[in-house]
Image (cartoon, grey):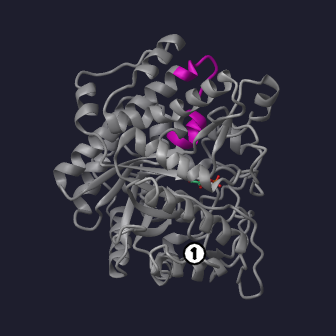
Amino acid sequence: MGFRKDFLWGGATAANQCEGGYDKDGRGLANVDVVPIGKDRFPVISGQKKMFEFDDEHFYPAKEAIDMYTHYKEDIALFAEMGFKTYRLSIAWSRIFPKGDETEPNEEGLKFYEDMFKECKKHGIEPLVTITHFDCPMHLVEKYGAWRSRELVGFYENLCNVIFKRYKGLVKYWLTFNEINMILHAPFMGAGLYFEEGDDVEQIKFQAAHHELVASAIATKIAHEVDPENQVGCMLAAGAYYPYSPKPEDVWASRSDDRENYFFIDVQSRGEYPAYALKEMERKGIEIKMEEGDKELLKAHTVDFISFSYYSSRVSTTDPELLEQTEGNIFASVKNPYLEASEWGWQIDPLGLRITMNDIYDRYQKPLFIVENGLGAVDTPDENGYVEDDYRIDYLAAHVQAMRDAVDEDGVDLLGYTTWGCIDLVSAGTGEMKKRYGFIYVDRDNEGNGTLKRSKKKSFDWYKKVIETNGEDLSN
Ligand code: BG6
C-alpha cells in the first residue's frame, strides 16, 4: 500500500512572503505589503487599524522578503535536488494587474511567472498555483473596499481569464483562495477588509465571503473551459476542534467552531450554502445579497479536490475563564493539556492530522491535498549556515506517518503533500524571519539584515530520502 505512485511531494510558499521586489517591473502595491512587523501587525491584519501606506517608523518585511524574485532559479534548483514533484507557489495579483481594475495585464508580471513555471518544468516539477494567497491590490482596497464590493468578482475573473489562457499547458493544479476562512479571522490580511467605526463587521465579512465564493466558482468554470485537464481545489485553514471536556456544551462548541470553517468548503465542494449557516446568519441578522445566477454558479462549478493547511488541532470550550486565554489569537483555541507546543505556542498533534483528514474526507468524498504543514522554529546555523534541525524532522516525520495512516488504515484518497515554507520565509502571522519552516536556511533576520545566502539544513537530506522512498523511510 502506501502513498500512490504519482504522489505529489513538494513544498509551498506564497508570493508576498518570499518574492520581495514589491515595486519591480510594474508591480502595484498590495495589502500584504503594508503590513508591518511588531505590535501594530495584529490590529492591521485584523482590519482594526488603518495603515495603508509605508511610514518610517515601521519595518515592512514583505517589501524584500527573501528576494525570491531574483533568486528563483537557484531556489527551484534546490527544490529539484530534494526531488520535489510539485512546488506550490502563489501569483501576486498586483504583478499581473498592478491596480487590479485594468483591462490589460502587465506583461512583465505575466512573463515572470511564465519563466518560473518553465523553470519548474525544466526540473520535472509540477507547479501548484494559488491564485490569491492573501493578496489584494491596494488600489482595490482603497477604491472599492476590497472584497466587500461585488466588483471584485469581475476583476478576479479578468485575472483568471488571463492566467488560465497564458499558462495553459504549464500549470494544471490551481487553488482559488488560500485559507478562504481566514477572511473571518484576519480580514485585512485575508481579504483586504478594513472596518470603519460603525461598520457592521459580520455583515461585511460574510458578504465579502460570498463574493469570494462566487469568484471561486467562476474561476473553476473558466479553468475547466480553458483546459479540461485543469484541476481546481479550494483551500481551508484546517485543524479539527476538540471539546475541552465531554460536557455536551463543550462538544457542541467544538462542532460549531468546526462548522464556522467548514462553511466555506461546504459551498465550494457541495455547491450550496448549508442549512446551519443560513440559520446562523438569520440569527445574527446577516443578509447576503446574491445576484441572479449566483446559486446556479455555485452549484454547477464545484471544486475537483480539497486542499488544506494543517499545523495543529484546536480546542473549544464554554468556560469563560478558559475562553479569555484565546483572545488575540488568529484562531481561538484553549491550551490542550495533552500536547506539547512549538516555541510560538502552536500545539503539536500528528494524530490531529489523521483526524482532520478523516473529517474532511468523510464530509466531501473528494481527493485531498495537504498543501501546508510544518514547524515554525528558531534555527541556529553554524558558520556555514548548516542547521541541525532534528526537531523539524521529528515533527514532519510524525505528520507524514499520521497521513500515511489515514491513507493506509482509513482509505483516504490523498493527492500530495507540500510542506509549508520549504525555504525560510517571512511569517504571515508575526512578520518574523526568525520563525523558520524551511529545509533551506536563508541568511536574513527580523530587521532585514543578512546576505540572503541559501544553505541546506539537516532536514534537506532527510526530506530528499522521504521523497525518494515515496514516504517509506522516515528515519532520521
Ligand atoms: C498559513 C498561511 O496560515 O500558515 C501561510 O497560509 C502562513 O501564509 C502559515 O505563513 C504559517 O503561519 P505563520 O504565521 O507561522 O507564518
Q: Which residues are magenta?
A: 184-202
Using the image as rendered, state which of residue 20 and residue 314 is in the foreground.
314
Residue 420 shows in this picture: no
The residue beneath circle 1 is 474
Query: Whole-percent x and y of residue 419?
Result: 53, 64
Residue 351: percent from left, percent from top: 60, 53
Q: On screen, 343 above or below 385?
A: above
Secondary structure state at the residue bearing disc 1: loop
Q: Quadrant of the C terminus?
A: bottom right
Residue under the image location 61 percent in, 45 percent down:
53
Q: Does 296 sit above or below residue 428? A: above
Q: Amino acid at mark 1?
A: Leu
Location of residue 83 with respect to 131 vertically, above or below: below
Residue 416 image offset from top left, x and y in percent = 42, 63
Viewer-side residue, 382 vs 365:
365
Left or right placement of residue 312 versus residue 86 in this view: right
Q: Quadrant of residue 270?
A: top left
How would you rate the neighbour count of disc 1 (Cα within 10 Å): few for under 14, some for 14-19, many for 20 or more?
some
